[in-house]
Each structure stands twice: as structure tokens, then as C-alpha cells.
Image (tube, rainbow, N blue to C red):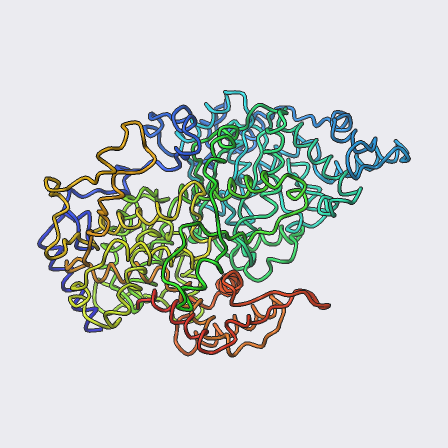
Amino acid sequence: MDTILEARLHTQQKSSQNGRETSLWSSGFGMKLEAVTPFLGKYRPFVGRCCQTCTPKSWESLFHRSIMDLGFCNAILVKEENTRFRGWLVRRLCYFLWSLEQHIPPCQDAPQKIMESTGVQNVISGRAPGGAGEGQVPNLVKKEVQRILGHIQAPPCPFLLRLFSWALLRFLNCLFLNVQLHKGQMKMVHKAAQAGSPLVFLSTHKSLLDGILLPFVLLSQGLGVLRVAWDPRACSPILRALLRKLGGLFLPPEANLPLDSSEGVLARAVIHAAMEQLLVSRQPLLIFLEELPGAQGPRLSALGQAWLGLVVEAVKVGIVPDALLVPVAITYDLVPDAPRYAHHASAPLGLWTGALAVLRSLRGWGCSHRVCVRVQLAQPFSLQEYTINARSCWGSRQTLEQLLQPIVLGQCTAVPDTEKEQEWTPVTQPLLALKEEDQCLIRRLSCHVLNASVASSAVMSTAIMATLLLFKHPKGVFLSQLLGEFSWLTEETLLRGFDVGFSGQLRCLLQHTLSLLRAHVALLRVRQGDLLVVPRPGPGLMDLARLSTELLPAFLSEAVGACAVRGLLAGRVPPEGPWELQGIELLSQNELYRQILLLLHLLPQDLLLLPPCQSSYCYCQEVLDRLIQCGLLVAEETPGSQLACDTGRQRLSAKLLWKPSGDFTDSDSDDFEEAEGRYFRLSQQSRCPDFFLFLCRLLSPLLKAFAQAAAFLHQGQLPDSESGYVEQLFQFLQDTAQEEGFFECADPNLAISAIWTFRDLGVLQQTQSPAGPMLHLSPTFASRDNQEKLEQFIRQFICG
């Protein structure tokens, strides 16, 4: 408490000295500039530019710089001005009149065209491998095709769409304060749609409401009726029938049958034909690239990859010349259905269950609990252009066991110059039906688009507040100090090219955020005019940790670099050593590169989401640049070495002197060995230790869960099934959290990530048995010595 009071007095003294002037880098490093107030909209970074490496033409042609002049709109705010009529009666019926005036283009699905398509006819006639053959009765085959097609889609009903839009508009206004949409991004998408290519929206998946909210928002903006690829596991049969009338698409169960099954071949042919007709008619399509919210498993959706594979195959065979892919990101202050799906994610949502959930949401949230939603539309890019340019970026890859296991065991020190191959998403039968090269293209395209969606996601106020309370002030902070910390972290987020999903006065914004988090935060009045904000100890910290992951992409590079620096200093300086002692050590660039690469290989690909066109070494340089820009690392010349800026006495070797002018097979920098003379120190500025510890703590839940999983290897009961061992490890994480207080590590998703990473690393091996796949310890890590080496390797990156 004394420390907190001293911090409060220090804050009050500083505020009285500086007055209204604040520091852009209030963490204590960097230049002091004029204050930027992001809450009033004076500075908004543009997010969502497509990849200049893979899609340079789209990067240049499908972006318009004037879009930043346009502001935001509330997609669910409908007034009298939004209708063609005026008057007191219109003001009371504006929702109904607005739904009647929505333009719903005719979406006549053509079953006859699907029946006459080449793929379906080849299967019926037996010309395709695994086809039905001539012996089948044509009427029976036709009925089977109609049955499969009825399971996939149905013609949208305009009356039902208008009625549902009216009811949904009233529901959303009761549940949300606003649904923000950037008008400039919408204008960019409209202009791309005028090119004539079908639009395919590829979105993140934060809530079960996403499949209803996103089509409603885009319909209200004049994009027509979206076809939404739903997960059949999430809906009951009655709800699936209703969603098909509203534009939903469902993958039939026959599509997942083996490749040599005639029913599976026919179902996949019908799906291909339906997708071809959808793209030819230029109906917009929405695909979720993330798994269902609350699902335990890989982040990339296997179903989303299957639907994306259908689009890629249609463009490849020339059904449509091109398709425009639009990454979409949706973020909430708080996910409305979070308490429900966290425990019942495996149960399909029924029609009456959904209605009861709506009533509970309206009753439980109330006006004071309404949240904000932000929908971000990234820059569209050409699928045809990506398929041409992306193949040139593919290089050799190795498994995690080949890359990391010799280093963990101390058998090798050099990190192989190759990329990590880590695919956790299972491959479905529709994707297996494609060529192996196309499967690889779809997997990397999915990762690329999901990276773009996450990079364009707006950071909400609850994520910033949860990060501050969990990783910067876990023991509490005064509200007067929290105001400055919140403003500082918001500006840091904006300076890193990430947008925020809030605006308004700072004090009102904090009051709204704390009211949303009041189940996890305690407010204590210790002095007149000020409050002490303390995160509640216990399992609620896990919810704060989940919220803080929304902010992690903005600081991921610096967090990786800080943990790598901690790992490099672990063998030289004790972790509890003073900052001045750590700053004495010289860190060479090669050592930093090696340590960053080791951590990159250890971290799951689902967390990093590195674009496939970017190599790990390029990312290492980006991490190092970020650490220098934020002031944590300072360049230092070694004693007695030639200064880096002194190029007058550098001598060229004979090979370089006599190299032909047109020979670019070797770089001139190879003989200079400039990297050998580059050294860095930790900055000694007063606020650097706190910021360094803050960055390290951002990855601490994952790394601590991995370290505890390594310590659990000698206690776990193996062999066991994967689900059984996940339960064992999760129970161990919970027990450890009760003893040590690190509840942010007691997450089942972290337990799954640790087990899958250890399986890729060769610590755990999976074998087939009559009872199914079983996990057991590999002979290499059966010894306690190697298990301790693994735990020590992980713990070197943990600080604080």
C-alpha cells in the first residue's frame, strides 16, 4: 500500500508540473512530443493494407487514400432520416420502414443448372472416378442430388429476410451501444465490387452472433444478401432450416466420406457445382476462418479452409476469372455469449435455445451493460494474383523436432536455416480431394488472410484495461494513475499501427470499461476523491487473460524480443539481479537472432500467425528494430573495434574487386561481416525496467503453462488418450494456480497448445491402439534429466 501511495503522490506531482501537457511516450523513453488525443479521433491509423509482396497490383489499385477522410457510422442507428418518409408515425415505425426499403436482389438458386453442371453429370454417368455409373436409375440419382442440394442451401426468402432484419435491428439496439463501421472501408469494398468479380469475405469468429450480425451489417450497406458458410455442428436441424432461408450454407455430412465413396464423390460434386453457380451469380460469400468461439483446438478452421478451397478451385478451373478476398475483423467489448459458450460449446444451438439465450441476454445485460462492437473491413485483394505470386515464396521447411530438439538437449547450438512446419488444423475430405499443391496453397492463404484480419482488428477498451490490471498493476492501482496508464497504452497501440474501437472522454470511457469488468475488478475507496482498482484474485483472472490476448498482436514483436533478451541474459545475470547489472552485458546481433529464432520455433503457429511470405529471419530483424525503436536496446560498439560508421578504411577482397558488374549471385555484405561487430545494451532509462517487465509478462501465461506442462511429464499417467491427458494437465494447472495464484495459466486451450507443441517437438508420441490414438512419452524424454532440460529451456524466457 505504501508503494501505491508513493506512486499516486508521484503522479500528482508530475501532473501538477506538466499541467495539460502529456508525453507521447509516458513510459519514460522516447521523445516528448505534443499530446495526441486519440479519443477525439484526431489520429487514426489506417489498418488492413493487403500484402505488397503477394498482391502488389491490388495493394496499389484497390486502395484509395481519400477513405480516411470519411468517419464512422453506427450500423444499427436507424432514424427518420434513413427512410423516404417523414412524420411522427414514421419516427415510431422507422425500423419497419427501413427493413421494407432494403434492396434485396433476386437470388434464384438454379437447381437445374447445378444438375446439368459438368461435374455432377460426370459423376452420374460414371466418367469421374468413384462415380455412380450407368446402372443407377436417373430419377433416383436426381432425387439424391436434390436432397444434397437442399441440405447445402435454399433460395433466400425476401419476406423472411425483411422480418428478420426488423427483429434483429430491435434486438441489436437493446444489446449493443453501437456497431461501428468505417464508411471509408465500406466505400473501398463498394468500389472493388464494381470491378465485376465476386466478393468473398473471410472473417474472424468471436461470437455465435457473428454469422447473423455481419450479414445484417453488410446488407444494410447495400451489398445484398450474403451467403454465410455455417458450421453444421453449431446448429440444430430446425435452426439450420431457418438459416438456409436467410442465406446460410451448410456442408452436407456426405462430403466428409472417404474419397473412394460414391456418396462422397457425388456430394462433393454437388458442392462444387453450387459454389460455381454462387460465384457466377456474383453473390457475396462469408467464410469464417477461425474455429467456433470457445472451441478447444486449432485456431484455423478446417471447415473454413474447405469452403475457401471450393472458391480457389472454381477460380483455378476458370469458372470465374477472379474473386476478390476481403479480410474481415469483428471485435466486442465483451462477447455477449461468453459465459454460455465457454461451457456448452459442444452442444448444438437450437431454435428455442437461441430464443431463450436472447431473452437472458436482454434481461442480464440491461442498459448499463451494453457493449460496443467494431467491424473492420480490410483492403480487398485478387485471388488470382495471390495464387500466381504466392507459390514463389514457398521454401523448405522442417518439423519442430528436427529444428528444436537437438538444441533443447544440448546436442547442437546452431539453429537450422529453414522454416518451421506446423499444421494443427485437420484436413477435411473436400480439401483432400484437391491436389497436394493446392492444399498447401489454401492452408497458407488461410493463414495469410487470418493474419490480415487480426492485424486490422480494433483493440477495445476492455482489452487495454485487462492488460493493465493483469500485467502492469496486478496488486492494484489508483484510478488517478490508471487514467494516465490507459491513455499511454492507447497511444502506444495507435503508434504501432493498430486501431482502437472506442472514443470519448477519458474518465467516462474508464467508467464504462470498469462497469463491464466489475465481475473481475474491485473498487476500494481509500481516500476522498480517489479509488483503488484491484483485480479480484481467483479464476476470474483467466477471463482477464483472455481479454488481454486481443491486445497481444500489437505488442507481439516487442514481447518476443523482450523474452528472447531475458533468455539471453538468463545464463549471465540472475533474474532478480538489478537492471543496472543487466545493462552492463553486451548482446551481439547474432546471439539475439539465435535467441529470437528459438522462441519463434517454440511458440505455436496459431499465436504467431506469421504470413507465409515472410521468413523467420526477416521477422527477427523486425523484432530487433522494434526493440531499438521503443528504446529498450541501444547500439554499442565493442572496445577496440572499428566504428560501424567508419567506412574509409574498409578493404575489399579480391573476389569482390574483380566481380563482374552484372553478377549478383553474392552480396557485398557477406565479406564485410558487419553483423559480427553489432552489439547492443539494455537502455538505462528510468522507465525501461517496467516496460521490459510488462512486455515479458504478455507472453507469461503461455510460457508458464508450457513450463508447468514440462514439469508435469513425470507425474502424468501415460499412455493415455489425447483428451484424457488434456484433462490431466488442465487439472494440474488448476491445482498449481490455487497454490501459486497464476490463474491466467489455468486455461484448457493453453493445455492443448502445450500438448500439441510437445508432440511436434518429439516429447510425446502418438500411436494407434484398439482404443484409438494414444499418447506416450518418447524414449528420448523418458529420462528425468531430459525433462528438466526441456523445462529449463522454456523457463529461460520467463521473467517475472
Relative to 294, say whether 153 is above or below: above
Of the pair 436 and 110, the residue shown nearer to us: 436
Rendered view: 605 above or below 327: below
Q: Which residue: 49% across, 77% down?
A: 783
Q: How many marks?
A: 0
Task: Kindly indicate the quadrant of the structure image that contains residue 120.
Answer: top right
User: Does the image show residue 94?
Assistant: no
Pick the front one: 760 or 229: 760
Residue 140 as seen in the image, left or right of residue 368: right
Foreground pick, 648 / 549: 648
Query: Residue 620, position in %: x, y?
Result: 33, 50
Residue 793 location, quadrant? bottom left
| Whole-percent x, y for residue 532 in the image | 27, 66
Residue drawn at point x = 59 percent, y = 75 percent = 718
Q: Residue placed farthest to the left in the image? A: 17
Image spot of residue 584 (x, y percent): 16, 64
| Left or right: 190 in relation to 657 | right
Residue 245, compared with residue 554, is above or below; it is: above
Residue lying farthest to the top in this orientation: 195
Question: Considering the image in quadrants, where does the C terminus appear?
Answer: bottom left
Name the spot of residue 396 as percent of width and height, x first: 48, 46
- Residue 331 seen in this snapshot: yes
Q: Quadrant of the N terminus?
A: bottom left
Say whether residue 461 is left or right of residue 431.
left
